[in-house]
Image (tube, helix red, strand yellow):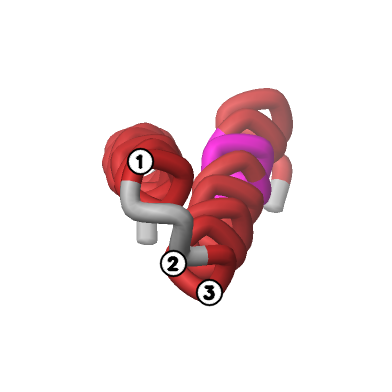
Amino acid sequence: MGELTDKIKGHANEAIGKAKRAIGDATDRPDIRAEGDAQEAAGDLQKAKGEVKGALGDKI
């Protein structure tokens, strides 16, 4: 995947994770909240991966 694709997917995962976490809080469901936290963390990592690809550019 390219830099831009990683960043976009990372933002999407982060947004979905935040929504799941809010639903888990509202419905008092710790399992959904944990799922949201995990997806948000995955989104953060994917965005960071895109940043690294952008920083390295054609050097890799």
SS label for mark 1: helix
Q: Residues within 10 Å of mark 3 (few under 14, many from 20)?
A: few
Above or below, 24 relative to 14: below
Residue 48 included in the magenta stretch of the image? yes
Q: Residues within 10 Å of mark 2 (few under 14, many from 20)?
A: some
Count of labels in the image: 3
Expressed as whole percent of the image width and height from the top left, the position of residue 59 reads 71, 41
Q: Looking at the image, which is closer to me, 21 or 15? A: 21
Q: CA distance from mark 1 to mark 2?
A: 10 Å
Q: Which residue is mark 3?
A: 31
SS label for mark 2: helix
The reply to whether the C-beta atoms of the residues labelled 1 and 2 are less than 8 Å apart is no
Q: Residue furthest front?
A: 28
Q: Is residue 11 left or right of residue 50?
A: left
Q: Looking at the image, which is closer to me, 12 or 59? A: 12
Q: Residue furthest bottom?
A: 31
Expressed as whole percent of the image width and height from the top left, the position of residue 51 reads 62, 30
N-terminal label among 1 and 3: 1
Q: Magenta region: which residues?
A: 45-50
Residue 13 included in the magenta stretch of the image? no
Query: Which residue does the image show at 44% across and 67% down from the upper left?
Result: 32
Q: CA distance from mark 1 to mark 3?
A: 12 Å
Q: Which residue is mark 1?
A: 26
The reply to whether the C-beta atoms of the residues labelled 3 and 2 are less than 8 Å apart is yes
Residue 32, label in figure: 2
| Quadrant location, the N terminus | bottom left
Query: Which residue does the image show at 64% across and 50% down from the upper left?
Result: 41
Residue 17 appears in the figure: yes
N-terminal label among 1 and 2: 1
